[in-house]
Amino acid sequence: MQNHLSSTDTFHAAHDLTIIHDGSSWRLYNGVQAPDLPGSEQPGTLIALLEAQVHQITCLPAFAKARNLPGNGQLEPADIARVVVGWAPESRNWHLGILLAPKPQNNFQQHWCGLASWPSGPSNESYDQARRAGLALARVINRPFQLVPAPEPLPPMSGETQPITSTQEMRAISAAAIAASNGVGTYEQAAPRPVTPPVTSPLTPPRAQPVVEPLPAIKHRKPPFNFEEWTMREIKRGYVWGRRGRWLVSAVLRAAGYGVLALLFLLLGIGTQTRGLAAVEPGWLPWLGMVVAILLVGLAMRALWSVVVMADVVIDMPRQEARCQGRFFGQPTWRVSFDQIAYVLISQTPIRPEGRDKQAKPMNTSQDVWLHIYDGAAFLPVVTLGQVAGQCHAWGQLRQSYKSKGRRRLTLALYDTPAHHAAQVMADALQVEVWLDIR
């Protein structure tokens, strides 16, 4: 009887990465020489960066740390929402990665983990290798596979494309991978392994979407952006959010006004008791005046304290960090490096229509806006802007979008306000995306 060995597939990716799939396992190696496998001409001595089997995925600790995976490098197939192969327009190459399932410790956000990429070039050059490698991984761990295709036609390449860093790689394809979870791309169910019963995918192909009119292109505005109490302006080191000068003057004047009123109440209250003035009826009024004076002193001190602890949020480009620091003493409240920042978050109330001159004109709008930076563990407050006015260039589409729950990417055609443009400027400087959360 003839022995049948399981077929072995080898895929060569960029940066000297090699993928070996032998039917029961999927391994990612950090070199081009094949390891010890049936048919190899010479033994290999390479260490696997990642090994996937039907019940477990094991990573090298250094590889797991670089990809922000669990420290022990251990994953179960249930931890993976899907295997994704997608085209990155910025680097013009195919990327293979996994989209981790949302968990409470990740604030229920899907986490993209890039595994391998292929050299830059035409979209059809490495398409088959990337797709087959992704399908092989999905088949081994029995998870859904999704392809995010390249847009066609693609613009011609100009000159030689330079390699990009792994951090930039992950950012270039993460948008397409997360978009995959919202119904962008093509689903392709990986065939189950012969020894494993077929498992129905928990995800279904996206429904056909109604045809909508294309949104107008909105030119990005540049700082300064002025609001009721805050201003965002460009500085030599990057950008800064700070209190407006008139807010500072108003706070000082409030403190002075409270102080003068407190002094008057104290003089009247004490004078009626010690200067032999005519008796005041009822007799408790002077004491009430002194209580009011004490409250006014407290308000004056509070107004002065708000000036003393006044803080600015700085996007520091040379240091590659964002921080909140006191304006007068410079003591930081929080600071985070660009590499740690996941996205900029705009929290806002539902948009309120303010009317428009004609049906074809944009809808005038208003909303209350808060800005935060998410560093993967906490939302760091940037500013509370209060009511912000703006325009919506596609009112019908905006109303339709409110039927979908959850966060969404910022579309300036729908939210054309100084606050949203300021958030986009921040995101461009930080090289992250802007997400909207409607309260």
Image (cartoon, rainbow, N blue to C red):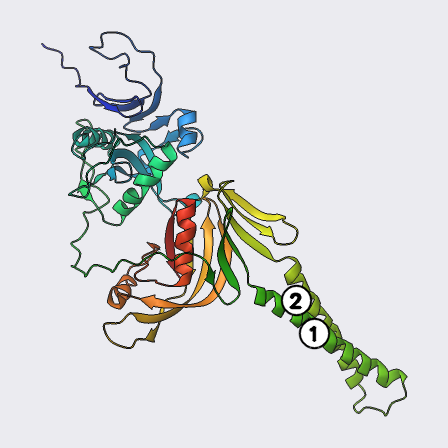
Instruction: Specify the amino acid type for callout 2.
Output: Ala
The label on residue 354 is none
Residue picked out by circle 2 = 303
Q: Is residue 370 left or right of residue 141?
A: right
Outermost residue to the top: 42
Q: Quadrant of residue 164?
A: top left
Residue at 38% in and 52% down: 434
Describe the element under mark 2 as helix, strand or loop. helix
Q: Residue at x 20, y 10 (%)?
A: 39
Q: Quadrant of residue 97?
A: top left
Of mark 1 and mark 2, the one earlier in the sequence is: 1
Residue 114 locus on image (x, y percent): 33, 34
* Few, some or many residues within 10 Å of mark 2 (<14, 14–19, 20+): many
Asked if the residues shown at circle 1 and circle 2 are in contact, with their CB atoms under 8 angstroms apart, the answer is yes
Q: From the viewer's side, name the closer residue of 30 and 196.
A: 30
Regarding residue 187, the answer to whether it shows in the image is: yes
Q: Amino acid at mark 1?
A: Tyr
Q: Looking at the picture, does residue 272 appear above or below residue 237?
A: below
User: Pointer 1: what residue?
Assistant: 258
Drawn side of residue 200 relative to residue 379, left or right: left
Residue 306, placed above or below residue 331:
below
Q: Position of residue 96 (x, y in %)?
A: 27, 33
* Helix, strand or loop at mark 1: helix
Measuring from the top left, give residue 307's x and y in whole percent: 64, 61
Q: Within 10 Å of the Cα at label 1, are there few (<14), some (14-19), or many (20+) other Cα atoms?
A: some
